[in-house]
Amino acid sequence: MAEPRTPAQVLREARQQDSRDKRARVLTVVDQMLAEKEPVTFTAVARTAKVSHWLVYAEGVREVIEQARRRQARQPREDGARKAPAGWQVEVQITREDNRRLREEVDRLKAAVRRSLGQQIDQVGAADLGARVDELTAANQRLEGELAQEKARAEELQGRLTETEDDLAGARTSLRRMIRSGNQEPVV
């Protein structure tokens, strides 16, 4: 009697079977593309086989696709000319359109930044800057004066604290003497 399988074993076997099925699907798609003389590209194979791009670049699968691409590249075309596969032409066209769109967006954003900086510069005139500098200088002088006053006050308070501590120490000493003298019994 066979031992019952653990859930982990069942899951591992299911994953392995799924992986084998997907790899077989990729190989079938490559054969179909070659038979129909469709351009074999990694993206086209992944899309047609409905698998991840990772799988078409995995060891064992990548080599099959590269071999099919080399075989297709060696085959003469019906019109006798060699030209880039249709998939590449589409990708080149999409890339050109993306580049054009991105250049337009960059130009638009640069113009927006220029307008914004221009508005900021227009809003802050030289007179406004001079007045702001004067205002900040006056505030700085006022704060320096307040700081000097607070330092003097802190020194005064420190002196008073020292005096109070001295008075407290003296009072404690006097209290101790009084307690000692009160606790001593009169000599008879």
Image: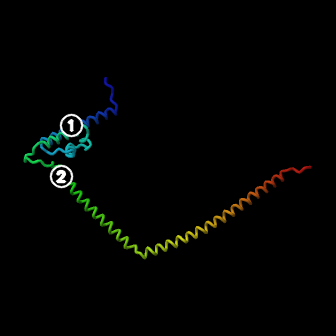
State the image quarter where residue 45 is shown.
Answer: top left
Q: Amino acid at mark 2?
A: Val
Which residue is drawn at the image coordinates 17% and 44% (left, top)? 40
Bin the neighbour count of mark 1 within 10 Å (Cα to Cα): few under 14, some 14-19, many 20 and up: some
| Image: 107 above or below 56 | below
Sequence-wise, the earlier of marks 2 and 1 is 1
Label 1: which secondary element: helix
Mark 2 or 1: the one toward you: 2
Q: Which residue is mark 1?
A: 24
Horizontal side of 99 relative to 171 (left or right) equals: left
| Image: 108 above or below 61 | below
Q: Amino acid at mark 1?
A: Ala
- Which residue is farthest left? 79
Which residue is drawn at the image coordinates 26% and 59% (left, top)? 102
Q: Which residue is mark 2?
A: 90
Q: Quadrant of the N terminus?
A: top left
